[in-house]
Image: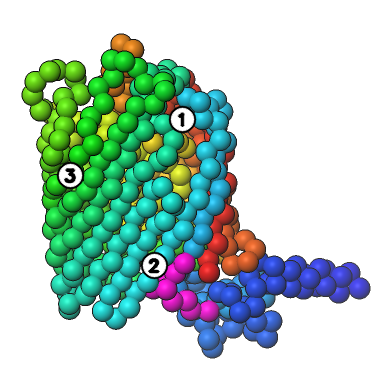
Amino acid sequence: MKKLRVTGVRLLLLIVFNLVLFPVGGDWAWSASASADQIAGGAGSNQEPGAYQTPLAGEERNVTFMGENILIPARDRGQLTSLTVGGSLLEPGQGGTRVLPIAALFLRRVWEDARTRDTISLFVNELEYDKSLGPLELVSHFENYTLPDDQTEVVDNREIKETSLTWGTLVGSFGPGLRLPVSPYQVDNHARLQLLGRLGYFYADRTDETGPGLVVPSDTLLYGARLRGSYDGMRRNLLELPHRGVASGWNLDYMHRDRWRDLTGATTGDRDRNYLQLSGYLVGAGGIPGFSERDRLLIAVYGGTTSEKGADRFNAFRINGGPFPSEEGDLGRPHYTGILYDNVLATSYATASLGYRRELLFFLYLTMVGSYLWADRATVEGVDQVVFRDKRGGAATASLDCAFFWNSSIYLAYSWESGFIRGGKPGSGITLIWNKLF
């Protein structure tokens, strides 16, 4: 009788697990007819006998959960729509920010002769459409950074109201590219090289709090070129997290600002009119000798620099935090795990992260990451003159990624940072993000 009660509880948990977390007709299905022996390597299984293999993104796979068979059907990763919402709670706040909301729509479409990748969050967007001509491509790209709120620099974790401005950029790029598929030949595994002409517009305006001594640049057209290359040999797991492989890339940007004022306040000269920027990254994931398939080692290295005579708050790199980078187009985003605020400006930077991920269950992952950052970060000199000074910091993050209701997933993380973003004062934050697949 005791055995029957235990079996009944297990069956109930399996039903709840299947119908609530992974609805029928979605990306998951439960087959109660298969036995544990079949999962260990019998018919219909693509695992080696006696060896556990982590379910990988897009692949059909049989796995065991509480002694029963879970069938994960194949999924077309070239047709993806996802909605991301969430936010971070900061303690103490970063400047005047205590709560940071997050919302974005992500689209990826891959056809036989074209593809598009779009990240849409209303005021900050990145859209790309590539037309294929064999291995050659015609690349069109658009991005805008047009926040409607006043943007104010932070010093010693205090907003300096005199630096307040409303400003933004819109840039379109077009040109030829080369795309070659690479191992393991998934939808996001390519070596790419692009040469793009760029045309854009920059605007800036004072606010009610702008200091009288702050130099505000003129609205202007932007002209330039971008040479960029990337390689993605990464294999992702079921939740699209890096599992094994290496990805790397670099950007070389040159931009000319048609109408410009020297931001140092000089009455003559145009030292800031032109600028050159170089940035690059390396991200990797792999097994750990002596450990199981469930244990992964993660690395991420980022760096960038701006020509000395053209560096200012309007063309600075925006260093971001959040989840460990994984999606192909997101890998190039400068990442520092301790930053929860998404607008830390730096004209030159270098950051390195080392992490460990444990697959607790095939749908649940624990990740721990430590990061170090050096950067010339935006600060304020005098009352309202924005300059950049050498700063360093360290951070640590512990996070959980888990499948959730309605074909979605949850990211929950706690981050601690030594003081890079709060004027030398350590701080922490909790981030909760829900990602829904359609």
Q: Which residues are magenta?
A: 73-81
Q: Position of residue 347 (x, y in %)?
A: 24, 32
**Of the residues under marks 3 and 1, which one precedes in the sequence?**
3
Camera-side residue: 33 or 347? 347
Q: Which residue is mark 3?
A: 222
- The extreme left residue here reads 269
Query: Callout 1: few (<14), some (14-19), or many (20+) C-alpha neighbours within 10 Å?
Result: many
- Prevailing secondary structure class for the magenta stretch in the rendered image: loop
Percent x, y for residue 200? 22, 48
Q: Which mark is residue 108?
A: 2
**Mark 3 vs mark 2, CA separation in Å:** 28 Å
The residue pinned by badge 1 equals: 417
Q: Are marks 3 and 1 in contact (CB under 8 Å)?
A: no
Residue at the spot 74% in from the left edge and 69% down from the top edge:
16
Task: Check disc 2: other Cα within 10 Å, few if <14, some if 14-19, many if 20+.
Answer: some
- Mark 2: amino acid: Arg
- Answer whether residue 203 is visible to the viewer in this image: yes
Q: Earlier in the sequence, mark 2 or mark 1?
A: 2
Query: Looking at the image, is mark 3 or mark 1 nearer the viewer?
Result: 3
- Where residue 146 appears, as percent x and y from the top left, is 36, 43
Q: Nearer the viewer, mark 3 or mark 2?
A: 3
- Can you give x and y, in whole percent of width and height, for residue 369 in the image? 45, 42
Counting residues from the N terminus, which is met first, the one under dot 3 or under dot 2? 2
Q: Is residue 178 left or right of residue 90?
A: left
**Identity, as a three-letter code, of the amino acid under mark 1:** Glu
Alpha carbon separation for disc pair 2 and 1 = 33 Å
Locate residue 217 relative to residue 17 in the image: left or right: left
Q: Quadrant of residue 261?
A: top left
